[in-house]
Image: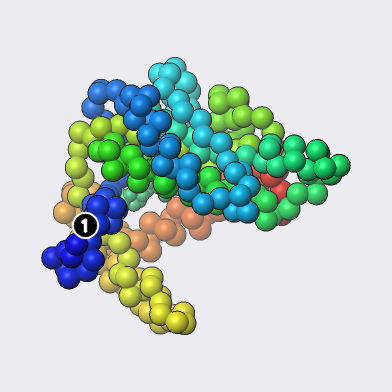
């Protein structure tokens, strides 16, 4: 298949090209069969060295979703969505494999934590795309890392497991305008990294994002993207995260 743009086309590419985060959901339930189908695709995601360093917690109970929303800054969509899925980095089975072979995980290092976090993210994204292919949309929730220990308590996560991100899923009742993306010329490099192109994408994106915000009536700074990024990330967000993850058995030092 070839699209209007002259590029090869597929259903999967179209699902991705049309996506946007959805935060408003119909009360229509997302059935167990839907969730099973979504996860049956997602769990075929590649996994580093076949480690399977992840676990997935499916949450439907309204009380649990309400509790989860609190450390996540009271995001309403967590309460409202029919199903919330937490994608967790999980080193417990790997620790067990070490122990069965006479070793322990006391000296675990950055690589293991990264591998588990990457693995969980790949499963999460695969679930997201699988869900969208069924008309079930949603939004990822990184705010579960605001207070990893609170989320662990609510979900009963043992040591060596932390929620990398969550995902609200449901049948959408909104179709927000797609948020523009950074110009592809700044993101995709051929053969060698082009620093001028990478940084050259910033000014046009500031303008593009500003006009997007204007078009949806959202107030924003004239240098929308650079201002937003600086305001959110220069004050060292989630500064206690490394210590919190260390407490959970992940050594990111
Ligand atoms: C790992 C991750 C965590 C996110 N966390 C949140 C969140 O906690 N709350 C929220 O409303 N959106 C969250 N988002 C959604 C982003 O804000 C959104 O993807 C981004 O602004 C681009 O918009 P779009 O998805 O509509 O294209 C998250 C996205 C990712 C990838």
Task: Specify whether 229 is left or right of 16.
Answer: right
Secondary element type, mark 1: helix
Q: Is residue 190 above or below residue 164?
A: below
Residue that badge 1 annotates: 212
Q: Identify the residue at image location x=70%, y=42%.
A: 94
- Dot 1, crowdedness within 10 Å: few (<14), some or many (≥20)? some
> Can residue 239 be seen here?
no
Which percent across, then down, holds residue 117? 57, 48
Q: Is residue 229 above or below residue 183?
A: above
Q: Is residue 147 above or below residue 185?
A: above
- Asked whether 167 or 215 is in front, the reply is 167
In this figure, which colouring scheme has been used for the structure? rainbow
> Can residue 53 be seen here?
yes
Q: Quadrant of the C terminus?
A: bottom right
Which percent across, then down, holds residue 180? 26, 59
Q: Identify the residue at image location x=20%, y=38%.
A: 174
Q: Quadrant of residue 31?
A: top left
Which percent across, then down, holds residue 106? 81, 44
Which percent across, then down, holds residue 22? 28, 40
- Asked whether 238 or 169 is in front, the reply is 169
Q: Quadrant of the N terminus?
A: bottom left
Task: Specify whether 95 is left or right of 6.
Answer: right
Q: Identify the residue at image location x=32%, y=66%.
A: 182
- Asked whether 191 or 252 is in front, the reply is 191
Q: Identify the residue at image location x=42%, y=58%.
A: 229
Residue furthest toward the front?
1
């Amino acid at each position: 298949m070839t699209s209007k743009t002259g590029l090869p086309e597929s259903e999967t590419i179209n699902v991705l090209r049309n996506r946007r985060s959805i935060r408003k959901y119909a009360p229509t339930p997302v059935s167990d069969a839907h969730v099973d189908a979504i996860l049956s695709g997602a769990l075929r995601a590649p996994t580093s060295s076949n480690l399977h360093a992840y676990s997935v917690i499916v949450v439907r109970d309204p009380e649990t979703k309400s509790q989860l929303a609190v450390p996540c800054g009271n995001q309403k969509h967590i309460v409202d969505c029919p199903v919330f899925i937490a994608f967790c980095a999980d080193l417990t089975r790997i620790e067990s494999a070490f122990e069965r072979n006479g070793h322990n995980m006391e000296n675990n290092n950055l690589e293991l934590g990264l591998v588990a976090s990457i693995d969980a993210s790949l499963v999460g994204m695969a679930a997201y795309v699988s869900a969208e292919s069924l008309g079930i949309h949603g939004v990822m929730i990184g705010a579960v890392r605001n207070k990893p220990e609170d989320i662990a308590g609510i979900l009963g996560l043992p040591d060596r497991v932390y929620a990398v991100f969550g995902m609200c899923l449901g049948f959408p009742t909104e179709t927000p305008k797609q948020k523009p993306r950074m110009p592809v010329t700044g993101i995709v490099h051929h053969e060698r990294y082009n620093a001028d192109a990478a940084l050259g994408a910033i000014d046009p994106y500031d303008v593009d994002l500003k006009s997007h915000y204007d078009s949806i009536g959202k107030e924003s700074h004239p240098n929308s993207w650079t201002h937003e990024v600086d305001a959110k990330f220069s004050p060292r967000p989630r500064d206690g995260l490394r210590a919190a993850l260390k407490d959970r058995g992940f050594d990111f030092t």
